[in-house]
Image (tube, rainbow, N blue to C red):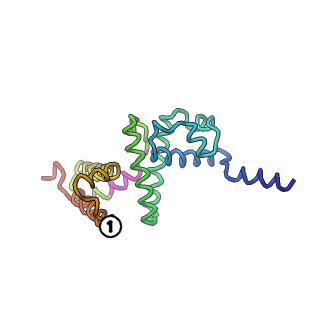
Amino acid sequence: MTTVGASTDSRRADVPLGRDEVVAAVLKSAAHLFAERGPAATSIRDIAAHSKVNHGLIHRHFGSKDALVGAVLDHLGGRLADLLAADADGGEVAAAVDCQLRVIARASLDGYAIGELQSRFPNMAMLLDATRQRQASDLGARLAAAHTIALQLGWRMFGDFLRASTGLEGLDDRTFARSIGRTVDLILDAKGPDDS
């Protein structure tokens, strides 16, 4: 009897129980799968299997797939903001940025209205606050922040093509990252349209 009980306990140990555990597991699994293949190629059943929850619970806690995509975007934005506020390890921050940008790009390419689905943008608010200190106007700060994210999204999604097409495939990652950082600094320090 001890063996059967231990087996049941070990199976239950990795199965999320209760609303909070189910929601956390679903958000983590959905973020991973959306970043890997995009929301359109990921079914609710895929997410349920990956998170070890019944697919009916996903519908109960999130409703529609659009609402789940919005919840994942909010989750990723909040997680990145928390990591940045905690001055977390650079590798952990880089992984969070990568996941968030991939989900944003894939959801957008899949036709999701991510600007409408995501309700909170805490990491963008942090970027805007930092950018306002470097810009003379609010419009200049907003444009600089948008250009910075566009640059990062472009390299994240099309980096292989961009490296190959410009002869940069041999450039080491450290030099490449420094170059992007310098370009971001130029964008953030450039005068805005009404700052001339």
Q: Amino acid at mark 1?
A: Arg
124 is within the stretch colored magenta: yes
SS class, disc 1: helix
Tell me which residue sits at (46%, 47%) in the image. 36
Which picture quadrant has residue 172? bottom left
Q: Is residue 183 left or right of residue 15?
A: left
Where residue 154 sits: x, y (%)? 30, 49
Foreground of the two, 64 or 11? 11
Q: Is residue 137 left or right of residue 44?
A: left
**What main secondary structure does the magenta stretch of the protein show?**
helix
Foreground of the two, 61 or 43? 43
For label 1, the residue is 174
Tell me which residue sits at (15%, 52%) in the image. 195
Tell me which residue sits at (33%, 64%) in the image. 173
The magenta-colored residue range is: 120-129
Q: Is residue 57 left or right of residue 155?
A: right
123 is within the stretch colored magenta: yes
